[in-house]
């Protein structure tokens, strides 16, 4: 049994914990430890997530399984084009992968995008991340490649898109 709710500033540590576990599981085969540590600290700092939640620059949804948060999604309108929504984050704890929670969260973000009157959803995925296949099954296609600097590192991504 699961439920979904909008995250609040009181959920910052929960989001950080899920990200820490999931990132290490997902990206250890792809990224060097130093880069992984830096990116986690940069993207998932208490200050950054708190600011996103308080100012509404990103909406986070938590998926709760048996009273325990086990997955989250973060989304917002794209800064450079508010007609397009962007799924910034989608992470499920490793022990819950395969239960359909990623699909459930994407569908919830799709619903929120449509409720806002928008019809395009983008996401970035590392070019070596197996999740690309999952996103393709969800109807996303590779729109273009993008290399995003984070400190002295680069995120080498596909930008994937789904027309709603």
Image (cartoon, rainbow, N blue to C red):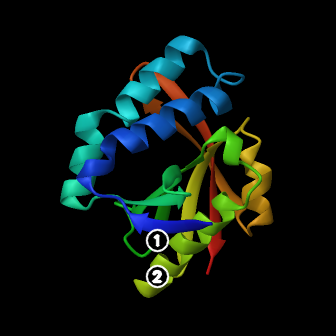
In what element is the residue under mark 2? loop
Q: Nearer the viewer, residue 149 or 15?
A: 15
Q: Secondary structure at mark 1?
A: loop
Q: In x, y percent, where is residue 7?
A: 35, 59
| Camera sees residue 119 | yes
Q: Position of residue 110 (x, y in %)?
A: 55, 75
Residue ID for mark 2 = 118
| Location of residue 58 with respect to 112 vertically, above or below | above
Residue at left 61%, top 14%?
32
Q: Residue at x 37, y 71 (%)?
A: 82
Q: CA distance from mark 2 to mark 1?
A: 7 Å
Residue 33: quadrant of the picture: top right
Crowding near the residue tagged with mark 2, few <14, some 14–19, many ≥20 C-alpha atoms within 10 Å: some
Residue at position x 63%, y 66% in the image: 1
**Residue 111 higher or lower than 17, as above or below:** below
Relative depth, front residue between 126 and 27: 27
| Placement of 93 over or under 135, stated as above or below | above
Rendered image: mark on residue 84: 1
Residue sitting at 63 percent across and 21 percent down? 31
Q: How many marks?
A: 2
């Amino acid at each position: 049994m699961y439920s979904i709710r909008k995250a609040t500033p009181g959920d910052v540590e929960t989001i950080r914990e899920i990200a820490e576990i999931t990132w290490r599981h997902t990206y250890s085969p792809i990224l060097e430890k130093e880069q992984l540590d830096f990116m986690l600290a940069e993207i998932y700092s208490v200050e950054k997530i708190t600011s996103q939640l308080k100012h509404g620059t990103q909406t986070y949804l938590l998926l709760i399984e048996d009273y325990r948060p086990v997955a989250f999604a973060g989304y917002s309108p794209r800064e450079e084009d508010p007609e397009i929504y962007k799924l910034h984050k989608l992470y499920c704890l490793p022990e819950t992968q395969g239960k359909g929670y990623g699909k459930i969260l994407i569908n919830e973000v799709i619903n929120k995008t449509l409720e806002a009157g928008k019809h395009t959803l983008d996401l970035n995925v590392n070019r070596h991340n197996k999740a690309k296949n999952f996103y393709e099954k969800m109807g996303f296609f590779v729109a273009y490649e993008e290399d995003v600097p984070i400190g002295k590192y680069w995120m080498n991504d596909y930008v994937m898109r789904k027309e709603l």
